[in-house]
Image (cartoon, grey):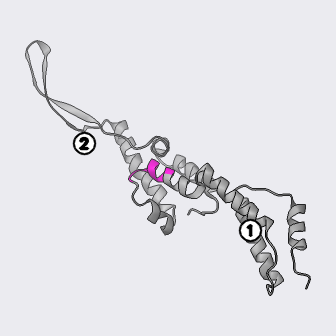
Amino acid sequence: MLDKTDFESWQQRIRLYCLRKDNGENIMKCINEGPFHMGTVSDVIAAGTEGAVQQGPVRARVLNDLLAEEKERYKADIRATNILLQGIPKDIYSLINHCTDAKDIWENMKMILEGSELTKGDRESQLYDEFEHFHQIKGETIKGYYVRFMKLINDMRNIKMTMPRMQLNSKFVNNMLPE
C-alpha cells in the first residue's frame, strides 16, 4: 500500500512487483507508454479476378482481431490498472478515479504526491520559513515542543531537505523557553 510520505520507495516497489508478474514487461510498457490501441481493420469481402481483393468498410478492431502478442498487451493494460488501483489508499483513489488507464493513473499520482517543481520549491520555502521562526510556545510541554519539532524535521526530510545535525540541535535547544 502506498505510504504518501514515501512515493519514491513505493514507485520502485511497484515497478519491481509489476516486472515479476507474468507479462511484466507489457505491464510496465502500459505504465510508461500508455494503453494499447486496437486500431481499425477492413475486412476482405470478396476476392476479385486476378488476385484483387475487395475491402469492406473500415471498422474498429475487437479482441478477436488481435494477434496473440497484441492480446497480451491488451490484457497487460487491465492488469497494470488493477495493480496501481489496489496499491493506493481511498483518499488518493478519490482524486484519480477519473483516470482510465495505467499511465494516466501513474502520472496523476506522481503529480499529486511529488508535485511540480514549483510546488516542491514552494513547500521547501514554507518549511525553511517555519524552521526559521520555530520556537516553544508559552505553556507548551517539552514533549509537545519536541513532537512539533520532529514533525517539522520529518516534513523537511520527506521532500529531501537536509540540514546539519548541529544546526537542528542548536535550533531545538536555543528556542526553548527559559522555564
At label 2, counting other C-alpha atoms closer than 10 Å, the crowd grade (few under 14, some 14-19, many 20 or more) is few
Residue 56 vertical position relative to residue 79 in the rendered view, above or below:
above
Q: Do residues under tags 2 and 1 come within 8 Å of each other at their CB atoms?
A: no
Residue ID at (29%, 37%): 66
Closer to viewer: mark 2 or mark 1: 1
At label 1, counting other C-alpha atoms closer than 10 Å, the crowd grade (few under 14, some 14-19, many 20 or more) is some
Report how far apart the C-alphas of labels 2 and 1 lie in the structure. Answer: 54 Å
Q: Nearer the viewer, residue 27 or 92?
A: 92
Please name the residue that numbered disc 1 is placed on.
152
Please name the residue that numbered disc 2 is placed on.
62
**86 sits to left or right of 115:** left
Q: Nearer the viewer, residue 103 or 81?
A: 103
Kind of residue at badge 2 = Val
User: Magenta stretch: residue 153 in it?
Assistant: no
x and y, in percent, of residue 48 in the image: 8, 18
Task: Decide whether the magenta segment is chiefly helix, strand or loop.
Answer: helix
Quarter of the figure with residue 44: top left
Q: Which residues are magenta?
A: 100-107
**149 sits to left or right of 36:** right
Q: Nearer the viewer, residue 127 or 54?
A: 127
